[in-house]
Structures are given as C-alpha cells and as structure tokens.
Amino acid sequence: MGVRVGKKSELSATPSPHVEAQLSELPVPKDRLTGQRVRLTPVPKAKAANAPTMDAQLVARQGPKLPRLEVAMKSNEIPALAASEVYLPPKPILDQLLRAKKILVMGHVPPDGDCVGSSLGLARALQAMGKTAHAMIDDELPGNLRGMDPHGEVRRADQVDQDYDLVVLVDVCANDRIGGGRDALAKAKNVVVVDHHQDRASPKKLGVGRNTRIAEWYAPSSSASMLVASIAENLFERSGTAVSKDSWKKIALPLALGLYTDTSGFTREGTPRKSLGVFKHLVNEHLGKQTSAVRQILRFELSKGAKKLLAKSESSYDHQQDFAFLRARRETITEAQRLAPDAGMNDLRGFMLQHLDDVVRSYGLAVLLWETDKGVLVSTRSKKMGPALELAKHISKTLGGSGNGHPHMAGGYPPCTLDQVAEVVSAWVKECKRSAQ
Ligand SMILES: [Mn+2]
C-alpha cells in the first residue's frame, strides 16, 4: 500500500521505517531515559563494538554531526542538491497531481513549520502550472509561522470550496489530525498522501470510502517539505512548465522554512547531510542566497508578562530521573492570554514548545502538557530515539486520543484533564526508572 521510492543515500542515511518501528516497540532499556548517566559510565570498547545498541546503530547510520548552518552555506563541505536528486516521487503521485485541475492541499493541526511549508509550497507549485490549488490548515498559525503566510493564503476548513478533484495530505495521514478538513477529505474521490512519519494511510484512517483512489508516498525524510520540493521539481519537468523566478521564490521559501523548522535549523541529532544540501540548493538557487533573511521570517516575540507567567507554569526539573515536566493549566493559559492580547493560543503554546526543545538538551526526556477545553495537548521530546514516541503511544493507549510522531519528538491529545495525564506520565517515568535499576 505504501509506495516507497527513493534514490540513493538519503534513504540509507536515515533510519528505515522497519528500524523505526522496531525502536518504538522496544521496551525502554536501561539507558534510554538516563542518557547522561550512561555517558558517565565508560563502556568497554570491545563490548560496545560487539553489541552496539539500536541507538548507536542509528547514529552510526546517520553519520557525524552537521556543521553549523552559516558555515555549511559558505563552505563546500555540504554540496547543494536539488531535492529531485535525492528523492524520486512515485509515478502514481505525479500522475494524480498532473491530471487534477482543482486541488486542495491539507496540513495537520496544530500546525508546525513543515506542514505550513509543504502545503503552501505544493499549492503554489500547482498554481505555477496553471491549476487552481488551495492550501488548508484548520487552525491559527502560531506567531513564528505567521510570516510564512503574510497574505493569508492558507485557508481554514470553512473557507474551502466543495468541488476539488483531488485532496492532498502533507505531513499527516489521518483524518483526526486535520480539524474540520476531515469533511472535505471524506468527499474526495482522489487522495494523495505525502508523509514522512511512520504511520501509513488507510481508507479507515482517512475516513474515505472504498472507492476513493488513494496514492501514498511515504519516505523517511527529515521533512515533508523536502519531499514536496522533489515533487515540484519533477512536476515542472514532466509538464514542461517554465517557472518564473518570482514563482520559484514563492515556492522555495515555505519549503526551505519547512526543512529548517523540522530539523531545528539542522541541529537535530541524525539530520542527514542531504537535508542541508537541499536547503542550500533552495536558498542559493531561488532565494538569493539570503539564509539570514529566510530565518528572519520565523522571528516572533511574546510580551514579557506572558513569558513570565508561562515560565511560572507548573514545572519540575528532575535530574535524578533525567526528566523535565511542564504543565500549563487552563487558568495559567487564560491569564497569559490576558497579558499578551496580540498573541494567539498557538503563540503561547509555541513559546512553551521552544522551551521544551531547549530543556531536552539537558534532560533525557521532556514533556509538556497543555490543557484545553477538549483535552490535553501532550508534547514529548527525548534526547534519544525512542522514549518520546513510546510515552506518546502509552498515553493514547491508556487515555485515548491519537498518539504519534517521531522516536524523539511525539505528541497526543487525550480527551481528559491535565491531572489525569500528569498521573499517567509520572507513573510511566517512574516505571521506566524502576525497571532500569
Ligand atoms: Mn514534518
């Protein structure tokens, strides 16, 4: 069902879906949650060589750390690469996109840079081919992503038309993660899914009938934007579309930002060199070689009062358990909103997510609980591959809601109270700690 096509080294440089699945199913071994402690304990070389851990294998496959972005852009160490040199999209995907005249491209909620980048990038690429195409994300964009859509091109579910002949899902493959977009998806006769997460699409998960034609492209990539970049290049070539400099600029900018955000600016452990190469190509070829101007688009500042209040949200930083736990209750969030009237809910949450990404560098596992009136948005991060996804899946298994993501960065949305989720999380961490002893 999942068509996996890819060229050369990007695929071999990233964990195969098989390996990822194995990782997420593994019980949490001794060193998973206590990365720091394990590093303090020297492992005899011979033993390490004989029995490398799954993590060690992954890191070995992914190669050494990437150079800093500024350095990489100037040096020849990382060659610029067209995305189509790295990935070849499956023919059924390109065929459907070439055939369709009116297309809706959807990303997930809450949105991240990659889903904004890939949906906007693909919609604009299709427009450049003379098609009618709309990007849709059924949520407000957080402050740091608003600059990606200055003219409000990205539609909400109640702004889409009724007569698309193709619906494309990017960076997501389930109808419980697209908000009100599920109605338009249910009506679709043709569906294309472009995703780099582990889950695969099915008629049931998409909420479509058996007669709906589904073409799926799953590829283990650092971002969906990178896959869309390859799709755009291939579509233009196959259709013989001459794309103006200005159009390419509008297409390349969201894609470059999608790549940038999904890899935390190419600092995330295991980010393949090819990802940076593709970013370099987009920026050098289409964006006037202006890396800093590209990154500038993501700048956003919360009011000091709101920052302070959110910083005061319940949090514990436990070095012994190697665990940072952040909890934002509805009351705290409402007060922060009052202090920062210009900021949206996703801005406030985005601020906490940034903090989460920061603390996971010092703690093996970091979790944010964000209480809403419908449930609790859970975000998990782990230094190593595995725990973040294992915990997200454990929460959804115990409390409901979809739990999914990457081995080091996952989330869920169980329909219950913050205290209920907090209890499950604490118990899981304690259990991991206990079984590690
Ligand atoms: Mn993504």
Image (tube, rainbow, N blue to C red):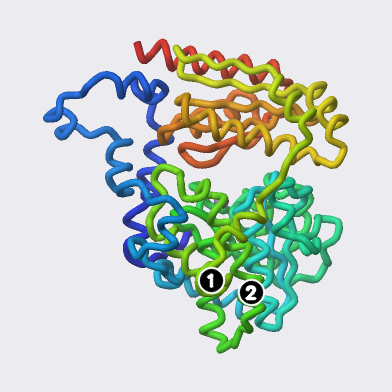
Query: In this view, which residue lies farthest toward the left?
Result: 46
Q: Residue at x 33, y 54 (%)?
A: 13
Mark 2 or mark 1: which comes first in sequence? 2
Say what secondary structure mark 2 lies in.
Answer: helix
Residue type, label 2: Ala
Q: Quadrant of the C terminus?
A: top left
In the image, is 346 to the left or to the right of 79?
right
Residue 351 drawn at (x, y percent) = 68, 36
* 342 is higher (above) or lower (below) than 363: below
Q: For the point 41% across and 36% down, which residue is it?
A: 385
| Left or right of residue 379: residue 302 | right
C-alpha distance separating marks 2 and 1: 9 Å
Comparing 413 with 201, the one in front is: 413
Place residue 22 in its image quadrant.
top left
Residue at 70%, 83% (x, y): give it: 130
Label 1 residue SS: helix
In the rendered image, residue 228, in percent from the top left (x then y), is placed at: 55, 66
Mark 2 and mark 1 residues within 8 Å of each other at the beta carbon: yes
The amino acid at mark 1 is Ile
Find residue 374 and name its label: none
Spot occupied by residue 371 in the image (x, y as percentages of width and height):
74, 27
Compared to 79, does 292 lie above or below? above
* Disc 2: residue Cβ within 8 A of ligand 1's nearest atom: no
Quadrant in which residue 121 is drawn:
bottom right
Ligand 1 within 8 Å, label 1 CB: no
Judging by the rendered image, the residue that carries numbered circle 1 is: 231
Return the residue nearer the eye: 39 or 372. Answer: 39
Mark 2, residue position: 125
Instruction: Indicate the position of residue 232 as horizontal and vertical percent values.
Output: 56, 73
